[in-house]
Image: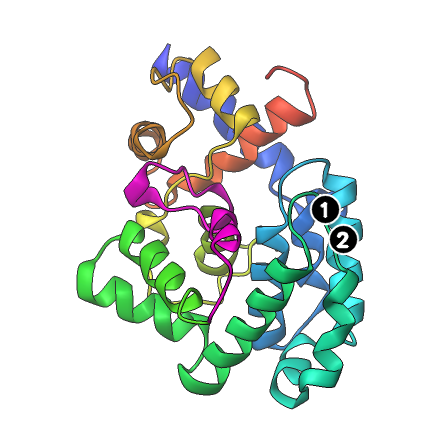
Amino acid sequence: MTIQTRTLLNQKVEQYNNLVFIESDPISIPHMFRKKEDIEISAFLTSILSWGRRTAIIKSGKQLMSLMDNSPYDFLMNSGEIEFKRFGDFVYRTFNSDDCLFLITSLRDIYLYQNGLEAIANKAFNENNSIIEVIMGLRKAILQTPHLERSEKHLGNPEKGSAAKRICMYLRWMVRHDDKGVDFGLWKDIPQSHLMCPLDVHSGNVARSLGLLTRKQNDWKAVEELTARLRDFDSDDPVKYDFALFGIGVFEGLS
């Protein structure tokens, strides 16, 4: 069964981990850019919006980039209170203008005073050699900016059991590298072997149907269980199987 499952997943990785995948996926938003900082910022904001229908996520992601003059890094570095008022009407599902203004302000502070998101992630990894600490390090840095308590729900906390799917996906985008052109692999100091698999309803249900996950809740313990099984298939690149689990669930309707 394990050999059959591995063969199936490898086939599905080949099927979905390619440039055709980008067009209908939220990762298409950061693929609009070439500058490293633009990719990092647009990818982070898009990942935070990434729940619900993918067409709606992409529409809102493009709207957010337009509000940043389609140059997110330059906008953050050179805009002030007047420009930030643009986000006063931005809403995506439960992500409202207060949440948006908080994250925009936080990202500005991070790039002005903390040398950017990669520097924070690298510091956390180098100190602890753990992706959960990278997630917590990014979360802590972002939450240093004054915010409403409601905004914290958009930043999953694995220490409280959250699967932190959106931040895990963001890290996959930034860290994972191959020759397929989907993930960016911009962050070189964090090994992709340490990445944790993004887990949502679709990937969780497919993983259970394939016997890769026994835990019923889609929480951090489930992320650890699933990723451990995927490392048995490829210890260097376990989260490549996110393409397979997601593709089977969303495109083939098996979730």
Return the residue nearer the eye: 11 or 116: 116
| Callout 1 amino acid | Ile
- Name the residue beneath numbered marker 1: 57
- Name the residue beneath numbered marker 2: 60
Examine the structure image and report whether residue 155 is included in the region drawn in magenta.
yes
Question: Label 2's element?
Answer: helix
Return the residue nearer the eye: 168 or 219: 219
Q: Residues within 10 Å of mark 1 (few under 14, many from 20)?
A: many
Q: Is residue 160 above or below residue 34?
A: above
- Percent coordinates x, y for residue 166 in the rendering: 51, 46
In the displayed structure image, the side of residue 208 where residue 236 appears, left or right? left
Question: Label 1's element?
Answer: helix
Q: In 3D space, how far apart are the residues under numbered discs 2 and 1 (Cα atoms)?
A: 5 Å
Q: Is residue 192 above or below residue 240?
A: below
- Percent coordinates x, y for residue 74 in the rendering: 66, 84
Q: Residue furthest left?
A: 128
In the displayed structure image, the side of residue 66 where residue 17 appears, left or right? left
Q: Are marks 2 and 1 in contact (CB under 8 Å)?
A: yes
